[in-house]
């Protein structure tokens, strides 16, 4: 069974731009969660989607948003990029959400210049 | 609010020696506890998890962890480390009452000496 895939793997943007990251969960998984990983703040929960609805949200500004499609694929969008948004963005999928095991993708490395 | 502390940022261990990584959590009730490993350029891989029952949990790659409620700890151990165990290890806590999200510790980077 294919694992969680994330595209693109690497991305370079400039301040003020917006970016969209994509996540394809494991087949059959309906829950997708997003995490931000930075050296200073570590791994932080962004949000979780289940059946096209945002079910949980972390403490991030409104510039961070996401959505989920009917095939469970998910996208996250960051508008008006700031230097501090440079991070590894990880997507995780599970059957129906916590406490099911979350399987992580390899991440998208975003660099904001 | 739930929180996780991994007191050791870096640990260096010789190949073949034993390894113990510490994890302390803070949560009002018994949480769900996880250990993940992250190799360079990779995502997170689940090593093991504890929900309830036997407090000694066996995981993949020869790892085990022990849940100690009295100490609010969930330490990860491996009897004999291989060079391929060099990676960063994350302890995480989750609870449905906390919104079905994982809260991670800061991570412990393990270096393996030949």
Image: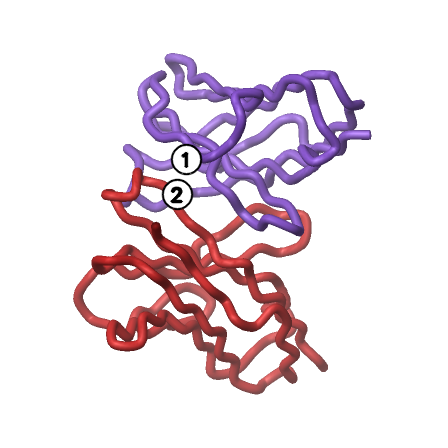
Chain colours: A purple, B red
Question: The residue tagged with tag 1: helix, strand or loop?
Answer: strand
Is the residue B63 above or below the residue A36 in the image?
Answer: below
Question: The residue tagged with tag 2: helix, strand or loop?
Answer: loop
Measured from the top left, where is residue A12 in percent x and y?
78, 28
What residue is shown at x 37% (from left), y 61% (from top)?
B48
Residue B74 - label? none
Furthest toward the left, the residue is B53
What residue is shown at x 52% (from left), y 21% (from top)?
A62
Is the residue A98 above or below the residue B7 in the image?
Answer: above
Chain on which label 1 sits: A
Chain on which label 2 sits: A
Furthest toward the bottom, the residue is B17
Residue A93 - label? 1
Measured from the top left, where is residue B4 in percent x and y?
43, 60
Is the residue A22 above or below the residue B14 in the image?
Answer: above
Looking at marks 1 and 2 on the same chain, the residue that comes earlier in the sequence is marked by: 1
What residue is shown at x 46% (from left), y 73% (from top)?
B22
Question: Neighbour class for label 1 at 10 Å: few (<14), some, many (≥20)?
Answer: many
Does A27 sit left or right of A79 as displayed? left
Measured from the top left, where is residue B28 in percent x and y?
24, 58
Q: Which part of the image, by quadrant, shows the N terminus of chain A?
A: top left
Residue receiving disc 2: A102
What residue is shown at x 58% (from left), y 50% (from top)?
A42
């Amino acid at each position: 069974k294919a694992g969680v895939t994330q595209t693109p793997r690497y991305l370079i943007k400039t301040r003020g731009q917006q970016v969209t990251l994509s996540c394809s969960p494991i087949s059959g998984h309906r829950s997708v969660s997003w995490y931000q990983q930075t050296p200073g703040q570590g791994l932080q929960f962004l949000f979780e989607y289940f059946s096209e609805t945002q079910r949980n949200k972390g403490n991030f500004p409104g510039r961070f948003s996401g959505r989920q499609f009917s095939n469970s694929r998910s996208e996250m969008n960051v508008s008006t990029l700031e230097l501090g948004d440079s991070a590894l963005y990880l997507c995780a999928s599970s059957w129906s959400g916590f406490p099911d095991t979350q399987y992580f993708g390899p991440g998208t490395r975003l660099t904001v210049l | 609010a739930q929180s996780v502390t991994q007191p050791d940022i870096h640990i260096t261990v010789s190949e073949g020696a034993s390894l113990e990584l510490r994890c302390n959590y803070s949560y009002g009730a018994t949480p769900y506890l996880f250990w993940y490993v992250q190799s360079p350029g990779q995502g997170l891989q689940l090593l093991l998890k504890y929900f309830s029952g036997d407090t000694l949990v066996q995981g993949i790659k020869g790892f085990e962890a022990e849940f100690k409620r009295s100490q609010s700890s969930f330490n990860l151990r491996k009897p004999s480390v291989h060079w391929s165990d060099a990676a960063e290890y994350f302890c995480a806590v989750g609870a449905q009452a906390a919104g079905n999200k994982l809260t991670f510790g800061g991570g412990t980077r393990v270096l393996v000496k030949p």
